[in-house]
Amino acid sequence: MSPSARWSLLAVPAALLLGFIYLWPSLGLFRTAFNETSATGAMIEALSLKVWRELMADSFTYELTLNSLWLSVTATVIALCIAYPISLFLFRTESRFRGLLAVMAIMPMLVSGVVRIFGWLTILGDQGMVNSAARWLGLISTPMHLLFNWTGVTIGLAESILPYMILALLAGFGRLDRALEEASRSLGAPPWRTFLRVTLPLSLPAIVLAAGLGFVLSMSAYITPKLLGGGRVFVLATEIFEHATTNANWPMASAMALYTLALMLGFLALANVLSRRLAQ
Amino acid sequence: MAYLELGGLAKRYRDAVAVADVTLAVEKGESVALLGPSGCGKTTTLRMLAGLIVPDSGRINVNGADITDVPAHKRNMGYVFQSYALFPHMNVEKNVAFGLEERGVAANERKERVATALDKVRLNELAHRRPRELSGGQQQRVALARALVIRPSVLLLDESLSNLDAKLRQTMRREIRDLQRSLAITTLFVTHDQVEALAMCDRIAVMNRGRIEQVGTPADVYERPATRFVASFVGSVNVLPADRDASGGLIVWGAPIPGAKSFASGDTDVFVRPQRMRLVAPSEPVAPETPHLKGKVEQNIFIGDQVETIVSGPGGQVTVQSLSGGAMPCAGAEVKVVWKPEDTLVFPREAS
Amino acid sequence: MTGAGRALSLVATLSYALIMAPIVVVVVMAFSADSFILFPPSGFSLRWFKTLVSNAPLMKALALSAQIALVVTVLSLAVGVPAALALEKGEFRGRDGLRGFFLAPLLLPTLIIGLALLLFFTPLKLTATLPGIALGHMTVTVPFVIRMMSTAFSTLPDNVEAAAATLGAPPWRVVWRITLPLAAPGVIACSALSFLLSFDETVISLFVSGPRASTLPVEMVRYVEGRTDPMIAALSVLLIAGTLAIVIIVERLVGVSRAVGQS
């Protein structure tokens, strides 16, 4: 083996490990979706589409699909509206705290999901921050129910995907030539027009990719819908977990997981195509 | 057999040829410059010599031994990089000692040799500084000391003066040349700066598009360039398109050029260096064997030590360079441009 | 007008407020004197910290999570750093494919990975065991280490490794004396982030944990599902403080904000 190829041997442990804990189980997951469950609940090795037929025939599946799609889209849009200004700010600012501000923006990523969910339980709860403030301001007399429903879940989810989208947007902005903005301003365009005519169009590819990322993260999110939904919010992710653990119906869980994966890939492909179109 | 021999070295990347065919023989203790524009393959050649790049074909011999397949760390060549490549996490002393440590040299001998090396480049007070605390010139000297302390068979310098400012470059040129001579170390250095090349070498190899177009002493290459590329790359030159006359002679700007013969086929260009041309009054008599052109002075450009005069004529323009301080014909004046017949260079015209 | 401008800065500030809100709120609630979630708290006390310390399942899970995170970090580095070296310094057919294979787990949602591991580990009796959970976390940390270290190795100063080679260092000594020391900041940042990744890993843990072995995030989820009192806030404050401490230490040693800016 040539000396430069000998380096590849260093990668063998990682390859073996990842093959064992990632590749093989993934193939197993794929395979399990074609097994069957007996009447007693045990799994039967088979190569059947029974579980798929069950999945597709169930109207609940479509309800779940719509729920997941709608939740993901809403959360992504909200997160985008918040992430874009922050990312733009970080890109443009010349403050010497820029590094610190960048870290602060993605700090939620470093804090475990449960912690943030507890934060939202406190903020959105019937006796939480929002309700207390609204009552104190005299806006309401009975508490708004912002938790254990779609509202709470959407807000919590939007906030949890925010740091990832900020990073994605920043990466996209990094490719923006700041000189273009300056050129526009020097030609007399006021800031908001510079934004509309130069910045926004040029950053569209980055926006689309960030949106794609946000969508995928939302579709596969489990803890936020489970905890902030209080058992009343049903999405594909929560049902996959149910089938896998409580019902121990592994074939169904696997099939649903592959189904969700297919939805995400489809959406990503769309985002990719769109982004490339816009980049031209 | 020469001390260092490169035979038919070639390297290509994807669709681009970096080095097409490089053959060169270097004597022991000789300093050879690889001169050429960026992209001509000179750095690739140097890196192949050092073992940092594997050639697609060709052989390299040092002192009779074929080292083509020997890995870089066994070649015992000192390499000075353009960016100096000093180890940022070690101080000057440790940087210079690195090669000696790798060779298992004992601690006290190491200390001694490092001190001597730093002495030679006058950096001993800075022995404990880190590279980032040094100026560009100082970093370069550390890189040099580091490469020399291991007593390499060949010293390789890769554009190592490019990052220095003009005055420093002049000083370092002389220093390196003196060091190279006093150590009698075989040196190959790469540069795109012809003044640097001519000043520091015993012989110069002019490269273009992956090939060596000419190897020779600085005088050879300047006075008797082998190709039109060498003629225009080394020193400055006027290119005058010429027409063929009935007997195979050449006509420029309507006037015959005595002593110049055209090529059997194709068109010919006449090359004359601006420094070899002289301005004389149009009325002054000119010997029949002296090439001359008649024209009008467009402008004189004063550049300190020299004056450049642009003279235009029926066929185009020429630049004549004279020492400043003398009387110059003013703009608009008619003038005759003369030069010695042995300074006429001819080359076939190339489609551009 | 260069820089961010006033309108943008205002909007950005509001957005920052939104990002920090849950964390700030949690910190406040940790010191609440109430027995349920009430904001603002009617009074302040340290009672929940005391309750926390005496909550055996949570403390046990905390210890286990720390243990696992440590093991995961060490193993991920042991496996990931050589792999990154192979990718950056080696030239062999299939290198790009191998890189893709190594980084692929980062693209797959932890929900899917967790499910796949549950299916795979159960017959192997690896569920609810320390090795099982550790392996589960490594699906995420090993690709992460490989990616970060690949970047670290590829952004070393130009030619220093070539210089070491010309000076007589064989390839493995170049790695030992030049590559690794210069990439040390990357290794440090990598270890810290790897530790945090494993410690906070929730979804995969939910799939492969069990009564015999349960990580802290899993126990926290169970607690929040069952009860709504500020205890989790007290725990969270400790976790946030710990995370901040690690980040600050790494920042001092290395400069995480630079690393973030580059990713």
Image (cartoon, rainbow, N blue to C red):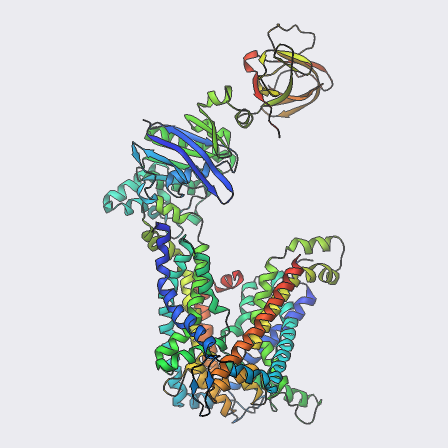
Q: Residue at x 43, y 68 (%)?
A: C249
Residue A279 in view (yes/no): yes
Where residue C139 appears, x then y in whole percent?
43, 71
Q: Is residue B299 left or right of residue A103?
A: right
Tell how many labels.
0
- Residue nearest the observer in this picture, B132 or A180: A180
Residue A12, given in percent of the width and then of the height, sits at: 36, 62
Q: Nearer the viewer, residue A186 or A243?
A: A243
**Relative height, residue C5 to residue B317 (above, below):** below
Q: Is residue C25 visible?
A: no
Q: Which sits in the foreground, C116 or A255?
A: A255
Q: Quadrant of residue B251?
A: top right
Residue at position x 33%, y 55% in the image: C176
- Give the vertical position of B304 relative to A78 (above or below): above
Residue C193, quarter of picture: bottom left
Q: Quadrant of residue B63?
A: top left
Pick whichever, A145 or C230, lies toward us: A145
- The image position of residue C70, as x and y in percent, is 37, 73
Q: Is residue A179 above or below residue B267?
A: below
Quadrant of image for the C terminus of chain A: bottom right
- Residue B8 in percent (x, y) is at 41, 33
